[in-house]
Amino acid sequence: MIKIKGGVCAAKGFKAAAYAAGIKYQGRTDMAMLYSESPCAVAGTFTSNLFKAAPVIWDADIVHGRGRAQAVVVNSGIANACTGEEGLDCCRSTAKAAAEALGIETEDVLLGSTGVIGMQLPVDKLEAGARALAGKLAGGADAANEAARAIMTTDTHEKETAREIEIDGIKVHIGGMTKGSGMIHPNMCTMLGYLTTDIAIDRKLLQKALSLAVVDTFNMISVDGDTSTNDTLLLMANGMAGNPVIDTEDERYEIFKEALFDVCLYLAKEMAADGEGATKLVECTVRGADTKDNARTLAKSVICSSLVKAAMYGCDANWGRELCALGYSGVTFDPKKVDMYFKAGDHEMLIFTGGVGTDYSEEEAAKLLSEDHVEIIADMHMGDESAVAYGCDLTYDYVKINADYRS
């Protein structure tokens, strides 16, 4: 497996485009299109929030119904959430306009929206944007990058990556782009994410691989504890690599699954590090847990703690906050057996052991915590299971960004 350039256009047959439709933002692109030259098997995971945005409902019907698609149209600025039947009508109109411009069926078009909840989208701008995007489609890294930038809201940079693997002597590619900076607390995953691959694979196995990848990647990140109405992760496979179809969980499936996980983990960490107002990526590794689920619960409890996040911003080695988060996680353990460390790069400090704090240097700890990638390690000494959660610090800028988000 090697990392390559090209984002969502790294896989054969995929093209992308961006367009400034003027939906909410001025002076920047705010619509993107992703298109495959061949029809795709499609898999997806969606928000668990009961207030599901109109495009989530639209996409879920396609993914869990016909299971194939050929294009995606995404807008930023307005979420098309809590918009009733008018919001669903907007989905139909946008998909129809895109389908007519591309020469495909309306149901072959998936949709995504991100931005302010409760506002109706300007349908005329979306329809015009969809038609314009169809005429701008191009392959290559530049087109993929433009699409990744067009779907951003409060993100500070585009998030994209791609991998190349070899299956049956044939080169296969997986690319992806995501957006997400605030309202990040996955339960499927709080974000918009689009993954492409030219592998030939059974649709049920495609869905299984995606669902498994999400568990320890997108579902293990948190910025602010809010699960969005618009969470969508889509994976499109057009089979254009030309490999024999993968229809069993054999070695070829495992190779693909590993590469897909790698793409998802990279994009998930990019989102965690780019949390609104954040200055650093914070990881919590829990090891020595008795079960995998308990390891995940413990790690996420630490990452989701506002007090831990604030301490990370202040470079304050106030280790009681991490221990407190472990203690209220709901997992039963022996506090006297817990060892906790702070780590940045090659520098690791034992902070707590045997039920008490160690005689560590506050100055040295503060210097460690000032790095832009900090790890919290908790060894529970209960078993052999481990998990990692990803988040960021909580800063003044997070409040500023979200206090005037609509203005």
Image: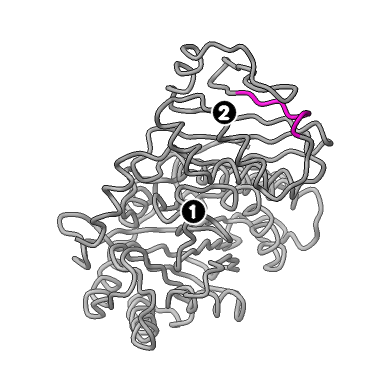
Residue 147 place in picture, x, y as percent = 35, 55
Q: Which mark is in front, 2 or 1? A: 2
Residue 193 vs residue 211: left or right? left
Q: Say the numbered circle drawn on residue 319.
A: 2
Residue closest to the eye, 193 or 50: 50
| Helix, strand or loop under label 2 | loop
Which stretch appears magenta? 335-341
Count of numbered tags: 2
Q: Residue at x 67, y 68 (%)?
A: 203
Q: Residue at x 61, y 76 (%)?
A: 64
257 inside magenta stretch: no
Q: Say the numbered circle drawn on residue 225.
A: 1
Residue closest to the eye, 192 or 407: 407
Residue 88 vs residue 380: left or right? left
Counting residues from the start of the chain, the first of labels 2 and 1 encountered is 1
| Helix, strand or loop under label 1 | loop
Choose top left, top right, bottom left or bottom right for residue 192: bottom left
Q: In which quadrant is the N terminus drawn?
A: top right
Residue 57 place in picture, x, y as percent = 49, 78
Q: In which quadrant is the C terminus drawn?
A: bottom left
Q: Residue at x 32, y 80 (%)?
A: 97
Residue 75 place in picture, x, y as percent = 32, 65
338 inside magenta stretch: yes
Q: Residue at x 68, y 45 (%)?
A: 258
Residue closest to the eye, 17 or 171: 17
Instruction: Tell me the kind of residue under disc 1.
Output: Gly
Residue 132 place in picture, x, y as percent = 25, 69
